[in-house]
Image (cartoon, grey):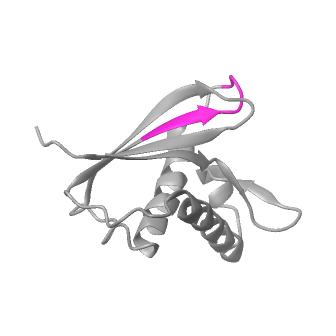
């Protein structure tokens, strides 16, 4: 199992602009800004994953625990869908994962981790997927 413990829920795309990684923001941004956000998250993950080798033992299950900034109720899929897309693309780009299709990732789960006002983030556990 691989754990990535501190995936941010927002990234800086310019000196003055930070964007939230969620579907409501993603669908309204210019494609170049979305691309900058994806690169920013990839850079953050690259620093966190220094020394990790190719993930093996497929298929995998990704379990995201999302720690929100406030007690306000959120739609986990709004956050999770964009976060998962960016994370999977980053893992493929860093050559830690051969591809992000169903041959390699058979399941994705999103869990509410509660509130972390100082550091809203997600934790990702990459596990071997056990078929029932």
Q: Locate the C terminus by quadrant.
A: top left
Residue drawn 55% across the image and 42% down it:
122
The span shown in magenta is 64-72
Name above or below for residue 24 compared with residue 55: above
Name above or below for residue 69 compared with residue 56: above
| Percent x, y of residue 109 | 37, 40
- Residue 69 forms part of the magenta stretch: yes
Residue drawn 73% across the image and 30% down it:
117
**Could one spot residue 78 in this view of the protein?**
no
Name above or below for residue 75 compared with residue 15: above
Q: Is residue 42 left or right of residue 40?
A: left
Q: Camera-side residue: 38 or 33?
A: 38
| Percent x, y of residue 44 | 62, 61
From this viewpoint, which residue is outermost toward the right? 16
Name above or below for residue 27 compared with residue 61: below
From this viewpoint, which residue is outermost toward the left? 132
Total of numbered circles in the picture?
0
Residue drawn 54% across the image and 55% down it:
82
Give the quarter of the image for residue 16: bottom right
Residue drawn 57% across the image and 66% down it:
42
Q: Camera-side residue: 48 or 62?
A: 48
Give the quarter of the image for residue 12: bottom right
- Residue 20 forms part of the magenta stretch: no
Q: Camera-side residue: 12 or 26?
A: 12
**Could one spot residue 33 in this view of the protein?**
yes
| Percent x, y of residue 127 | 29, 45
């Amino acid at each position: 199992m691989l754990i990535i413990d501190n995936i941010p829920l927002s990234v800086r795309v310019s000196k003055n602009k930070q964007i939230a990684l969620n579907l409501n923001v993603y669908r309204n941004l210019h494609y170049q800004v979305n691309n900058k956000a994806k690169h920013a998250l990839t850079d953050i993950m690259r620093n966190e994953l220094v020394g990790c080798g190719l993930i093996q033992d497929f298929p995998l299950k990704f379990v995201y625990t999302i720690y929100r900034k406030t007690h306000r109720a959120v739609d986990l899929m709004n956050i999770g869908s964009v976060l998962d897309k960016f994370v999977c693309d980053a893992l493929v780009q860093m050559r830690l994962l051969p591809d992000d299709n169903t041959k390699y990732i058979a399941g994705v789960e999103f869990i509410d981790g509660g509130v972390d006002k100082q550091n809203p983030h997600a934790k990702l556990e990459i596990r071997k997927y056990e078929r029932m």
